[in-house]
Image (spheres, grey):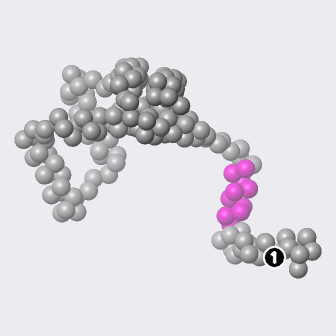
Amino acid sequence: MKTAELQNSIIQKVLKTEDNQLLNYLNQILNEGKAKETYILSDFEKSVIAESEADYLAGKIISNEDVNSRNEEWLKSNPQKELITSNALKSILQQRITTINDHKILSAMITLLDVKSEETIYYTSQEQKAKVREGREQIAKGNFFTNKQVEKEIDEWLGKE
């Protein structure tokens, strides 16, 4: 596939996706090389990182719920810090993808998009959940066969032994 075809294919997949986490991840990937060269931490940011590292080394770890709560409070108190919308992010990605000529990066991006779009969420009925619970209970009681035992039994049924 030619570079332009890859770029167009990626852009189409980006425009179709509703997975904001994936979009943000792609944006991070595209920012990575650029960020290493251009972003310099402020003294405040350095102090926050040093403080966080010291807390971590001292065993002071906060729960995800506390982190989420603090983030929400911060966002409320800093309204000028707007979160990027999905459409804006798609537009940014579209512009950046058209500037990439590295076939390896484009191939990796399309693979990532393909894998993420193939993920399926399976919903189970109450009956299926009950069967799973029953199976787990049987395993807990030791009522199961090993793979070798099953293979041996199949071989016997097929007359291979």
Most common SS among magenta residues = helix
**What is the x, y in percent for residue 159?**
92, 74
The residue closer to the viewer here, 144 or 20, is 20
Q: Which residues are magenta?
A: 128-137
Query: Is 33 left or right of 41, judged from the image as shown?
Result: right
Label 1 sits on residue: 152
Q: Relative to 78, say whether 47 is above or below.
A: below
Q: Label 1 amino acid? A: Lys
**What is the x, y in percent for residue 154?**
85, 70
Q: Relative to 43, say whether 76 is above or below.
A: above
Residue 118: quarter of image: top right
**What is the x, y in percent for residue 156?**
89, 75
The residue closer to the viewer here, 79 or 14, is 14
Mark 1 crowd level (few <14, some 14–19, many ≥20, 10 Å Cα)? some
**What is the x, y in percent for residue 96?**
35, 25
Q: Relative to 146, say whether 102 is above or below.
A: above
Figure quadrant of the C terminus: bottom right
Residue found farthest to the front: 2
Query: Is 16 left or right of 39, judged from the image as shown?
Result: right
Find numbered disc 1 in the image and state the secondary structure of the residue it sits on.
helix
Q: Residue at x 42, y 31 (%)?
A: 23
